[in-house]
Amino acid sequence: MSDPTVTTYQRRDIYALAPDDPIVIAYGDAVAAMRDRPDDDPGSWTYQAAIHGSGAFPAPALANECRHQSWWFLPWHRMYLYYFERIVRAEVMAQGGPADWALPYWDYDRDGTRTLPEAFRNPTRADGSDNPLFTPSRRPGINAATVALPQAATSAAAALARPLYTGTAELGGGASTAAGQFRGMTGRLEQTPHNDIHVLVGGSGGLMGNPDTAALDPIFWLHHANVDRLWWVWAADAAHTDPTDAAWLDQSFSFFDADGSQVALSCGDVVDIVGQLGYTYRAGMLFPHLRLPPEILALLRRRLELPPWVRRLPMPAPRPPSDEGTPEPSEVGSHEIVGGSDRPVSLVGRAETVRVAVDARARRDALGDAVESQVLLDIDEIDAEANPGAVYGVYVNLPEEPSDDELRTYHVGNISLFGIERTHESRGDEHRHGAMSVTMDITDLTRRLGEQGRWDPDSVEVSFRPLALDVVAAAGDADVVEGAGAVSHEELPISVGRVTLRVR
Ligand code: C2O
């Protein structure tokens, strides 16, 4: 399953590899071989995807196991990729491919990398053979590379700036005492870029847009390698700590290894990718030749990844460790609700704004003195009958007819509906959790506005605007419409039930 001469496998930046690099070709060849295996072989392409999600009935052993919307999201997907990578590597080696093969990652947050990597775009390879890395089941403009992912969806800066792992407003999601799925406590990295990229690549009805089909798209694995890399980047910062709660460390999940045997890992087994799992991330094109310790590289990369306007912000001071890992619903008790929206919002492809009425006493005591407070924005009861394939940016007190600069300044996060089907009807998990929720820490924005004398707690307005894909190349009419962000989905409205402000 592994090459004994390799001690640490290097996951490489797909944008640093040519489309015909042996690593890329070997991945495609292995995908093709796995597609040829019988469906009931745990190492087959369909079975591997079914471990994440499957509409099949009856579902095979260990199917539908993916963990979302809680602090299990990052470790579960790290384990899932680890065993998938071993299965692929065994096939690569059986075919005589590179023995140090490791899964590449797609870092979509740099200029020039926001389009789908070239090796995944075309139905045929350069030599004319079928391209196993292609699927027509993506948003057409993404496959054609006529549109690029918008930076508001690719940026992990807000997630990586979170001081804590645990919490819905933090990096890794809320503490779930049960190992359940789709728990309604999505963390910031899971939402952006993770959920947003799924929706933007898959569109409405494409493989990547639904957890039951997402892992059938070969790009899924490179997307998740990047999400895993971002967790690693965050954790490399000495100020950051992964959960230390036994409930998290000891929770184990089961998978199949490359020899078909059933195996298990606990979250505590996967916090150190080099020491425990034997892989690391090779820096992308920024530092191809430097041999610096990974912590230093991670810090350098992190500095460079932050857009300039974020770099200027004071980083929030880490809160005392006693706040970590409090049992669900962790954050509710320690924050005071000070305001809420007066009506639900229906999103069909246009910008919408909702006013948040703020309690007068709270306004005086807390919000008026936002400099000292932590201000959280909860967006609850986010729902739709099915995923309309749209991502909305969320903005607080956005001026009318905003400039691009203002859109960046007032942006506090995104909403998108990856997993809404499973949120409605969880499998292998008793209760229906209903709709989706996200929490955004808007303290930085209120502080900046406060300093400029522009934070008026009397008129807090929350706006939702569909994120447009960036048009990067001449395109057919359909792509132009997509690129312009005229994603109209009148037939499939997204409802937002409630917007709440909380302060601590
Ligand atoms: Cu379990 Cu990107 O999904």
Image: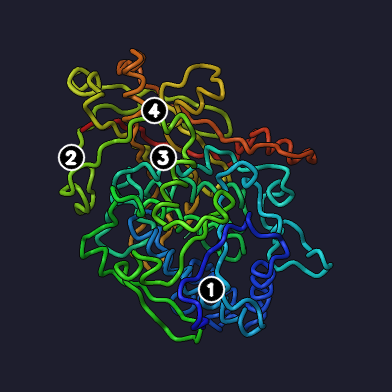
Q: Quadrant of the C terminus?
A: top left
Classify mark 1: residues with Cα within 10 Å, few (<14), some (14-19) or many (20+): many
263 is higher (above) or lower (below) than 187: below
Name the mark on residue 158: 3
Name the mark on residue 48: 1
> Mark 3 and mark 1: span between their CA atoms?
31 Å
433 displayed left or right of 366: right
Question: Which amino acid lies under the numbered mark 3 shown in the image of this protein?
Answer: Ala
* Cβ atoms under marks 1 and 4 closer than 8 Å: no
Query: Which label sits in the foreground, 1 or 4?
Result: 1
Secondary structure category for the residue under label 4: loop
Question: Which amino acid lies under the numbered mark 1 shown in the image of this protein?
Answer: Gln
Determine which quarter of the picture holds residue 103.
Answer: bottom right
Q: How many marks?
A: 4
Q: Earlier in the sequence, mark 2 or mark 4?
A: 2
> Mark 2 and mark 1: span between their CA atoms?
41 Å
Q: Earlier in the sequence, mark 2 or mark 1?
A: 1
In the rendering, at what x and y percent does residue 431 appear?
Answer: 33, 60
* Cβ atoms under marks 2 and 4 closer than 8 Å: no
Q: Which residue is mark 4?
A: 343
Q: Which residue is mark 2?
A: 334
Query: Which label sits in the foreground, 2 or 4?
Result: 2
> Mark 3 and mark 2: span between their CA atoms?
22 Å
Secondary structure category for the residue under label 3: helix
In the rendering, at what x and y percent does residue 396 appear?
Answer: 41, 26
